[in-house]
């Protein structure tokens, strides 16, 4: 009967994906993706009326610097609303979600004392890691897509479907706006791979899922703080979060791909190295739980 054993058929991706989707933390994470635009709409509709114009404003063009009237921009149609939701979400919320789905993989099995039984099935260690990672990245990217889809739908109902008005100048019709939102979404998903990579490394180091997730989020936050220190000069270019806002170049009439190419390359290389480190670490790990 052992002749029928094939390593590549153990722990199927579909089975693991369904198993993770059914977990409560997945529903909570996806619920937050829908809740964010709903909360912002409620705050705008029910909160005190601003004395400023509801348009995008013509102040500082440094999008995301905090000096721009983001609420005014968000109320200028569903495309702008989605853009602002991506800005709000790409900081702490999406970082936490990406870290959660990658950090709560192996560590959760260890905390439940089921990891050794999975490996005794027998599931090869590297296949276990790759399936867990693939499912984690799938769930993470799905959360990002849900945020965009929910923002587009909620924004259209609340603020209409006016063309995308760029805070850097110009406007884009629906087809062009959709393409640019798609590019921005893809880039944000790519940059968040760093958080996933750190969380995935930590999930094979510790048996505490919260520790793996928290470490990844903490490292990203520290990187963001250091990136804000101008005294570091060019050293900031080597920080993981330095190119996190490079997607704002997509809002220019002519897209400048330079910073985004650097940011995407950094994230992919760092993610690959972290995953490789995690695999090597797990190969030598004594699994006792």
Image (tube, helix red, strand yellow):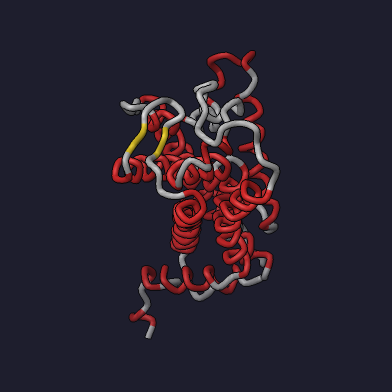
Q: Is residue 234 above or below residue 203?
A: above
In the picture, which quadrant includes the C terminus?
Answer: bottom right
Q: Looking at the picture, how far across and down is residue 234, in whole percent?
A: 53, 15
Q: Nearer the viewer, residue 187 or 154?
A: 154
In the picture, which quadrant includes the N terminus?
Answer: bottom left
> Would you identify the image quadrant in which residue 31 lies?
bottom right
Residue 160 in view of the camera = yes
Q: Nearer the viewer, residue 222 or 12?
A: 222
Residue 203 in view of the camera = no
Identify the residue at horizontal 59%, vertical 51% (top origin): 41
Q: Looking at the picture, how far across and down is residue 59, in whole percent?
A: 54, 22
Q: Which of 25 and 119 is in front in this view?
A: 25
Q: Is residue 43 above or below residue 58?
A: below
Q: Looking at the picture, how far across and down is residue 82, in whole percent?
A: 48, 46
Identify the residue at horizontal 61%, vertical 47% (top origin): 93
In the visual, does 32 lie left or right of 164? right
Identify the residue at horizontal 37%, vertical 45% (top origin): 182
Identify the residue at horizontal 63%, vertical 53% (top origin): 42
Q: Looking at the picture, how far across and down is residue 169, in whole percent?
A: 40, 25
In the visual, does 253 lie left or right of 204? left
In the visual, does 199 lie left or right of 13? right
Report the label total.
Answer: 0
């Amino acid at each position: 009967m052992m002749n029928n054993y094939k390593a590549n058929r153990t722990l199927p991706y579909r089975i693991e994906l369904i198993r993770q989707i059914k977990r409560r933390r997945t529903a909570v994470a996806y619920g937050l993706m829908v809740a964010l635009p709903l909360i912002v709409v409620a705050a705008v509709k029910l909160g005190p009326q601003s004395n400023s114009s509801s348009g995008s404003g013509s102040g500082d063009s440094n999008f995301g610097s905090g000096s721009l009237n983001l609420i005014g921009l968000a109320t200028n149609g569903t495309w702008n609303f989605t853009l602002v939701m991506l800005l709000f979400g790409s900081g702490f919320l999406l970082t936490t979600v990406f870290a959660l789905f990658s950090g709560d993989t192996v560590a959760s099995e260890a905390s439940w004392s089921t990891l050794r039984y999975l490996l005794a099935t027998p599931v090869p260690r590297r296949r276990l890691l790759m399936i867990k990672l693939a499912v984690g990245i799938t769930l993470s990217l799905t959360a990002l897509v849900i945020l965009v889809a929910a923002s587009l739908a909620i924004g259209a109902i609340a603020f209409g479907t006016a063309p995308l008005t760029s805070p850097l100048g110009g406007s884009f019709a629906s087809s062009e706006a959709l393409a640019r939102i798609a590019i921005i979404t893809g880039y944000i998903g790519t940059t968040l791979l760093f958080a996933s990579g750190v969380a995935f490394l930590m999930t094979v180091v510790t048996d505490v899922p919260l520790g793996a997730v928290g470490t990844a989020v903490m490292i990203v936050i520290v990187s963001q703080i250091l990136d804000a220190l101008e005294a570091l000069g060019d050293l900031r270019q080597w920080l993981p979060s330095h190119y996190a806002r490079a997607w704002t170049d997509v809002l220019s009439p002519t897209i400048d791909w330079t910073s985004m190419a650097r940011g995407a390359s950094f994230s992919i290389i760092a993610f690959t190295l972290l995953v490789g480190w995690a695999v090597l670490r797990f190969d030598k790990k004594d699994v006792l739980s």
